[in-house]
Image (tube, helix red, strand yellow):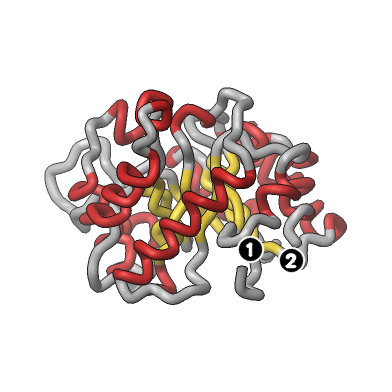
Amino acid sequence: MAARRQLIAGNWKMNGLTGDGVGRAKVFAARVGAAGVGRADLVVCPPATVLGAVGEAIRGSGIALGAQDCHAADSGAHTGDISAAMLADLGCSHVIVGHSERRASHGEIDSVVREKVVAAQRHGLVAIVCVGESLAARERGETLELVGAQIAGSVPEAADPALIVIAYEPVWAIGTGRTPTVEDVARVHAMIRRCLSSHGLGGDQQILYGGSVNPGNAAALLATENVGGALVGGASLDADDFLAIAESCP
């Protein structure tokens, strides 16, 4: 991996009311300096209801604010949705798009994800584009084919390299405690690197690994070739675990 700082992104998912989110954010902000995470950039992605409050709590800490989704349109009759423009207005710098939970629960296909990437980049947000295979696809030996197709369909041809990150999250590993072998991760990330090259994205483009990342496996995963950081789920809700993962960056 090129000598670019790794990115450790915490996806809080649908967890936390205002008090929980702000309290957690304040702990993170207070501990970042003492934790010695100079080798990593940190971003937290709380639920939309607490984005503003969490943003205030981490202001000036060096921790960036991200969202968990955005709509492809800037405004309009889209009840319940949030636009990239609104996220930028709140102080977000990142947004997750195409997470497997949204692909599965909300029927988001690659073309929808691609439109969201375009919207995010239009407003200066870094789009963290999630890709990954199901257990059934893995067992059929279709991982590389499926993930390659997701990259081709979800990444715009004219994507701004400064505003896109790929996160490989094998669906079967998310929240299960199971992870692929380091060799498997290296193989998939190498294929993703080749796919990104076909989009004109450089060799230092960040490719995160996600799926049951924890302090026990983080060091090995983050030291793997073509792994540029981690998208962390459950462990990002605990300051000790999240910062330990960040400290594992080589």
Query: Which mark, residue 6?
Result: 1
Residue flagged by tag 1: what amino acid is it?
Gln
Residue at image location 23% in from the left, 69% down from the top? 157
Q: Position of residue 60 (x, y in %)?
A: 67, 65
Which residue is labeled 2 in the image?
39
Looking at the picture, tell me which residue is in the foreground, 5 or 15.
Answer: 5
Residue at image location 29% in from the left, 60% down from the top? 155
Q: Position of residue 94 (x, y in %)?
A: 46, 58
Looking at the picture, tell me which residue is in the foreground, 40 or 27.
Answer: 40
Looking at the picture, tell me which residue is in the foreground, 137 or 31.
Answer: 137
Horizontal side of 17 relative to 70 (left or right) equals right
Q: In the rendered structure, are the residues bearing label 2 and label 1 in contact, judged by CB atoms less than 8 Å apart? A: yes
Query: Which mark, residue 122?
Result: none
Q: Residues within 10 Å of mark 1 (few under 14, many from 20)?
A: many
Locate the C terminus and report the quarter of the image it occupies: bottom right
Residue flagged by tag 2: what amino acid is it?
Arg
Residue at image location 43% in from the left, 74% down from the top? 162
